[in-house]
Image: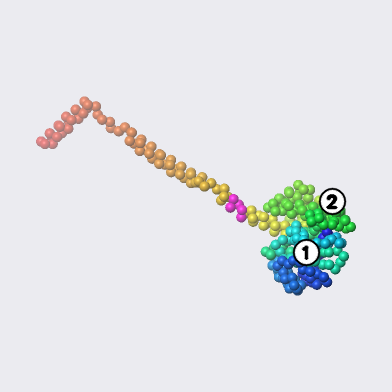
Amino acid sequence: MLSKVYSGHSFSHACRYIVNKQGAKVLECEGVRGHDYKLMSDDFRMQQQMRPGKEKACFHCSLSFYPGEVLSDEKMVKIAQEYLEKLGIVNTQYVITKHTDRKHLHLHIVANMVNNNGKSISDGYLGFRGKKIAQQLTQQYNLVPAVSKNIELTNFEALRKSEANKYKIYKEIMQALPHCKTFQDLEKKLQQRGIEVQYKYKGQTLEKQGISFKIGEDCFKGSKVDRQFSLGNLEKAIATNQKQLQEIKPRVAEATRPQGPSIRDTSVSMRQQNTVTKGLENVIEMLVKPEENPALPPTELLKENKRRKKRLSQRRL
């Protein structure tokens, strides 16, 4: 089975071609009307408006089977759906049609690269990835391999070295970026993979204007590797990572906070306890403290009694 991705098609052009071709049959529709290509393209464009900045929202490809190979409609739909899933084109509108105008049976797929939630679907290296997925599905479904097209050679060795390096940069950034909170994080992770990050500055200032990635002798602007890797888009992605981290921190702190009294509460409680203890000690000390004027000895008591009697008698006189 062969995969071919067409670029630059509008929904109107693609829908007209796949539906109006002589002998065409619509096998499966998701989220669009399949009986009229104009209504179909209207449905695609309506969802595209959820992401106006996504200019190339139309994905169009063909899957061609070996001449003489016969498959049921159900099996072809299953293969096409799995092809889309492996490409990451999920949760979106699509249509699958069968064409029989040539010697070999083939399918056409049109899908919306703006998904049902209004988010953009990554379109990096769709042609290359589509070929690799077609190889996998050929083996999985026991289809006749397209030897005449040398599809088995569609790998890093078959690509020019610079194209292979560009694709390696793409893969490494895709893996590293979700874990980066700063550009320094991204630089460090890519450096560990043999990729150097270079910046373009505005005039003699430190204001960054662009970003490039170098591997070996090959250096590519971020936007040439993939549009989502331009300096501006990378800044947005890293800012999103930082925001998500800030939202997670309070939840983690709350989840790990001890259920017992806090350190401050414990400290206050201990001070209060010390105060009470000290007060009790003072009371006990007062209770056991000897009197300042201890009782007089017995002889002195007798003398004191005599003096009292004498004073009383004098008062009576």
The answer to which image quadrant residue 123 occupies is bottom right
Using the image, tell me which numbered label, if any, was put on residue 217.
2
Q: Residue furthest left?
A: 317
Q: Is residue 230 or residue 40 the one in the foreground? A: 40
Residue 136, image x and y in percent? 80, 54
- Left or right of 105? Residue 234 is left
Q: Mark 1 or mark 2: name the one nearer the start of the chain.
A: 1
Residue 149, image x and y in percent? 88, 58
Q: Which of the two discs, 1 and 2, sits closer to the camera?
A: 1
Magenta range:
247-252
Magenta: main secondary structure equals helix
Residue 164, image x and y in percent? 83, 53
Distance from disc 1 to disc 2, alpha carbons, whole Å, reads: 48 Å
Looking at the image, can residue 126 be seen? yes
* Residue at mark 1: 73
Q: Residue at x 10, y 36 (%)?
A: 317
The answer to which image quadrant residue 269 occupies is top left
Using the image, tell me which numbered label, if any, was put on residue 230.
none
